[in-house]
């Protein structure tokens, strides 16, 4: 465990003591948030040490010693033996203090050629890459679950709604297939966002480079980045902007989750009765013995708000000039919170989709004769009757008719993608292609 801090890494011996209240305000919740980023920070520090060795700043034995200590630190942190807490200004300071306490002046050399600015940038970039990759794979599983259920129930009739009113005959296959395609679109956006984020900022220091021939390319390769973010000022100007991109990609997924959860909230009511949730996704009422509440679905519906709030919070911070500004510290909390919520939601959703029980009889019984009006009108129009005249004729024909009086084959005469021709194979082909974009990760 590290000693209680009596001074900060940037503080000179002849400076007056730092006001505790001011330092608490400046640090905020940084040291707690850095617990999430800490493993990435340690990993990036090891890569930086190896880079310093390659340009002769550190000897091979010194680099091996420092990397060994960093491995020890990561293991101690993972086991809970090293705690990142208020004794440290932030995770970056904790790493340097740990090394200095164990290796003296050698530990203090680890910061050669880097600033906390590019140190936090690379740790955050690694965190975003890891989190978005997890969100990507969770979205793949969700899309696959929706598509598999759509294939299983492709011809199960259910009402199609506009304005929350019964409108035309639809099917469970069309409903679930729609979400499979929507989540596939989200995959394309996440993959593109990851392409942008997959660039190493390490070696740009405070935003203007340093007078050392740092092996930036080697460090980037060591950390698994596809390329360098070349310009040092571009690195600092992308702080917050990249976090916003990651959250916006995750938000698109959460918006589709919210829509699906809304549908389930309606369809599981007694008034609809189209879907039944297994008991593990519900809770009982504290006062009403007859109640089971769809709490998991309702919280999935509400979680999009967390992402929307995080996006708004970061957007409001980014009215800044070029270079690093301390305001950017405040992007950390909404980023971590938002990506955590998205990942947590996607850990639950695929299994929920697979476990849903579709109540086919209730869906079928909800189809009424008037819902075939559009089919009848189009049948007339196809013979050359002007559509508005066909519309009037269909309206008259449906008066007093029952579902049994309507030609059931009409619902098969639909455009590509509709109930009679869902073309789920095309959705599956695109999903397979998109899901392969991150095979290396």
Image (cartoon, rainbow, N blue to C red):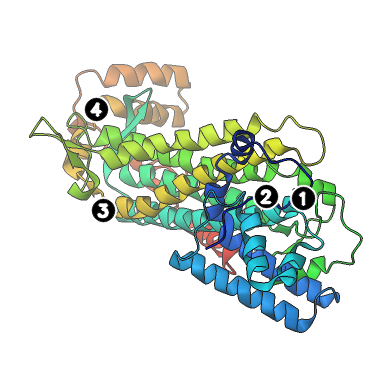
Q: Secondary structure at mark 1?
A: loop
| Foreground disc of the pair 3, 1 | 1
Question: Dot 1: few (<14), some (14–19), or many (≥20) neighbours within 10 Å?
Answer: few
Mark 4 vs mark 1, CA separation in Å: 86 Å
Which of pointers 2 and 3 lies earlier in the amino acid sequence?
2
| Foreground disc of the pair 4, 2 | 2
Which of pointers 3 and 1 lies earlier in the amino acid sequence?
1
Give 127 or 342, whichever is nearer the viewer.
127
Q: Secondary structure at mark 2?
A: loop
Mark 2 vs mark 3, CA separation in Å: 56 Å
Which of pointers 3 and 4 lies earlier in the amino acid sequence?
3
Residue position marked by numbered label 3 in the rendering: 355
Q: Secondary structure at mark 3?
A: helix
| Foreground disc of the pair 2, 3 | 2
Labels 4 & 2 near each other (Cβ < 8 A): no
Q: Residue at x 55, y 68 (%)?
A: 74
Q: Residue at x 74, y 67 (%)?
A: 48
Question: Dot 3: few (<14), some (14–19), or many (≥20) neighbours within 10 Å?
Answer: some
Mark 3 vs mark 4, CA separation in Å: 32 Å
Question: Dot 2: few (<14), some (14–19), or many (≥20) neighbours within 10 Å?
Answer: some
Residue 302 x, y percent position in the rendering: 39, 34
Mark 4 vs mark 2, CA separation in Å: 79 Å
Horizontal side of residue 271 vs 436, given as left or right: left
Residue 282: which numbered mark, if any? none
Which of pointers 2 and 1 lies earlier in the amino acid sequence?
2
Labels 2 & 1 near each other (Cβ < 8 A): yes
The picture quadrant where one finds residue 366 is: top left
Labels 2 & 3 near each other (Cβ < 8 A): no
Residue position marked by numbered label 1 in the rendering: 13
């Amino acid at each position: 465990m590290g000693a209680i801090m009596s001074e900060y890494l940037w503080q000179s011996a002849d400076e007056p003591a730092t006001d505790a209240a001011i330092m608490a305000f400046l640090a905020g919740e940084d040291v707690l948030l850095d617990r999430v980023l800490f493993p990435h920070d340690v990993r990036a520090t090891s890569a930086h040490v190896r880079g310093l060795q390659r340009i002769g700043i550190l000897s091979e034995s010194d680099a091996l010693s420092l990397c060994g200590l960093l491995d020890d630190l990561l293991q101690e942190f993972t086991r809970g033996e090293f705690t990142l807490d208020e004794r440290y200004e932030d995770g970056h300071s904790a790493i340097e203090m740990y090394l200095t306490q164990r290796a003296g002046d050698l530990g203090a050399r680890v910061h050669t050629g880097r600033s906390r600015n590019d140190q936090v940038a690379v740790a955050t970039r690694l965190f975003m890459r890891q989190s978005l990759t997890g969100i990507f794979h969770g979205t793949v599983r969700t899309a696959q679950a929706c598509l598999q259920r759509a294939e299983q129930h492709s011809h199960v009739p259910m009402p199609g709604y506009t304005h929350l009113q019964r409108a035309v005959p639809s099917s469970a296959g069309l409903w679930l297939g729609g979400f499979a395609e929507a989540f596939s679109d989200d995959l394309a956006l996440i993959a593109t966002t990851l392409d942008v984020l997959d660039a190493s900022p390490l070696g740009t220091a405070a935003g203007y480079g340093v007078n050392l021939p740092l092996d930036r390319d080697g460090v980037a390769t060591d950390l698994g980045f596809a390329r360098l973010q070349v310009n040092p000022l571009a690195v600092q100007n992308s702080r917050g902007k990249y976090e916003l991109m990651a959250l916006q990609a995750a938000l698109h997924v959460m918006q589709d989750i919210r829509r699906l959860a809304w549908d389930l909230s309606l369809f599981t009511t007694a008034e609809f009765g189209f879907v039944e949730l297994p008991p593990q996704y519900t809770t009982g009422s504290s006062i009403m013995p007859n109640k089971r509440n769809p709490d998991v679905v309702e919280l999935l519906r509400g979680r999009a708000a967390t992402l929307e709030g995080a996006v708004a919070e970061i957007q409001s911070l980014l009215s800044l000039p070029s270079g690093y500004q301390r305001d950017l510290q405040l992007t950390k909390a909404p980023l971590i919170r938002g990506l955590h919520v998205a990942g947590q939601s996607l850990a639950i959703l695929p299994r929920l989709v697979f476990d849903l029980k579709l109540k086919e009889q209730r869906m079928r019984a909800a189809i009424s004769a008037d819902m075939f009006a559009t089919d009848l009108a189009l049948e007339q129009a196809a013979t050359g009757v002007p559509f508005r005249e066909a519309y009037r004729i269909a309206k008259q024909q449906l008066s007093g008719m029952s579902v049994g009086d309507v030609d059931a084959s009409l619902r098969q005469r639909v455009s590509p993608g509709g109930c009679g021709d869902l073309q789920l194979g095309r959705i599956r082909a695109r999903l397979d292609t998109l899901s392969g974009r991150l095979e290396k990760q």
